[in-house]
Amino acid sequence: MKTALITGCSSGYGLETARYFHSQGWNVIATMRTPRDGLLPRSERLHMLSLDVTNADSISAALAAAGPIDVLVNNAGIGVVGAFEATPMAHVRKVFETNTFGVMAMTQAVIPQFRERRSGVVVNVTSSVTLADHPFAAAYTASKTAIEGFTGSLAHELSAFDVRVKLVEPGYAPTTRFAQNTDVRIEDMIPEAYASFAAPIFAAFANPPLVTKETDVADAVWQAANDVSGQLRFPAGADAVALARAS
Ligand SMILES: NC(=O)c1ccc[n+]([C@@H]2O[C@H](COP(=O)([O-])OP(=O)(O)OC[C@H]3O[C@@H](n4cnc5c(N)ncnc54)[C@H](OP(=O)(O)O)[C@@H]3O)[C@@H](O)[C@H]2O)c1
């Protein structure tokens, strides 16, 4: 029986991905900063562990407690929306600590066991912002685009050991906690000088023609984790698939 360790399982895409892998008969190690009961079914194949991907001690402790794993899903992430000139550099660094360095640190920590066993898959969840440029997402896009380049390069290097590295690129889901899971407010990051430019963009954003569902991402992570065709990128959700086709 295979084991997947998934980061950021307290809500949204990560929670649904944990449920999906469990429903397919896998062992699932659902990690989150603050584990809590009631989120996931009680099962011998489902273990919750505390993990903050920005903390090296937390990463070591979680991987030691997890034991051998077959798939690492780097899903944990935070967003930032706003004019770049108004985005505090402290917050830009925080976004990179989670979305970029957290992914790299988790990946580096599992490579030895995958390389030694000559098997294993890392699935990095980025975003459809890497498929087309959007205003007011510069810092977030930078954090995710770095992981796109990182993953493509690493996929080559680890193929020497039969270890696979994949990208899942979800579109926009209004239903996850993503917009709320931040300590900066959008209103504080749209200065008056940008207001007239921003208004129609945010109006369109409030009524997107296509969106992504949590199940779309869980399904794409599943496809990526089980893919042996060499495909690197797995857009997830109707909006992301449309962008990928256009790009
Ligand atoms: N929703 C979208 O529109 C969208 C679009 C494209 C890509 N994405 C990406 O999809 C992924 C999941 O996002 P989501 O929409 O499902 O958002 P979400 O509901 O906010 O889930 C994000 C998860 O990441 C966790 N997390 C945040 N910082 C962490 C840290 N330092 N260590 C460990 N876990 C941490 C959160 O846990 P806590 O409970 O500890 O806060 C939460 O479980 C993210 O990488 C995001 O960038 C989202």
Image (cartoon, rainbow, N blue to C red):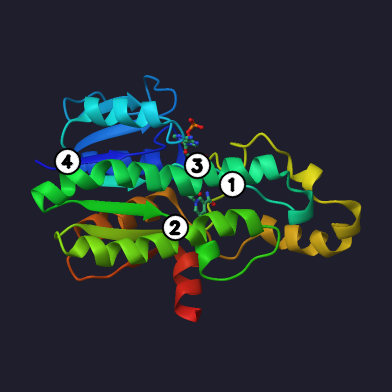
Residue 58 sits in quarter: top left
Closest to the camera, between mark 4 and mark 1, is: 1
Instruction: Decide: few, some or many residues near mark 1? Use Cα within 10 Å; few <14, some 14-19, many ≥20.
Output: many
Q: Taking the image as drawn, is residue 24 in sight?
A: no
Residue that mark 4 sits on: 26
Residue plotted at (73% across, 52% down): 82
Residue 17 in the image: x percent, y percent? 33, 44
Q: Mark 3–mark 2 contact, CB under 8 Å? A: no
From the viewer's side, name the closer residue of 122 and 208.
122
Q: Earlier in the sequence, mark 2 or mark 4?
A: 4
Instruction: Decide: few, some or many residues near mark 2? Use Cα within 10 Å; few <14, some 14-19, many ≥20.
Output: many
Q: Earlier in the sequence, mark 4 or mark 1?
A: 4
Q: Mark 4–mark 1 contact, CB under 8 Å? A: no
Q: Amino acid at mark 2?
A: Ile
Q: CA distance from mark 4 to mark 3?
A: 26 Å
Residue that mark 3 sits on: 98
Q: CA distance from mark 3 to mark 2?
A: 11 Å
Relative horizontal placement of residue 226, taking residue 177 as reference (left or right): left
Q: Is mark 3 within 8 Å of ligand 1?
A: yes
Q: Amino acid at mark 1?
A: Gly
Disc number placed over residue 147 in the picture, else none: 2
Residue plotted at (26% across, 31% down): 63
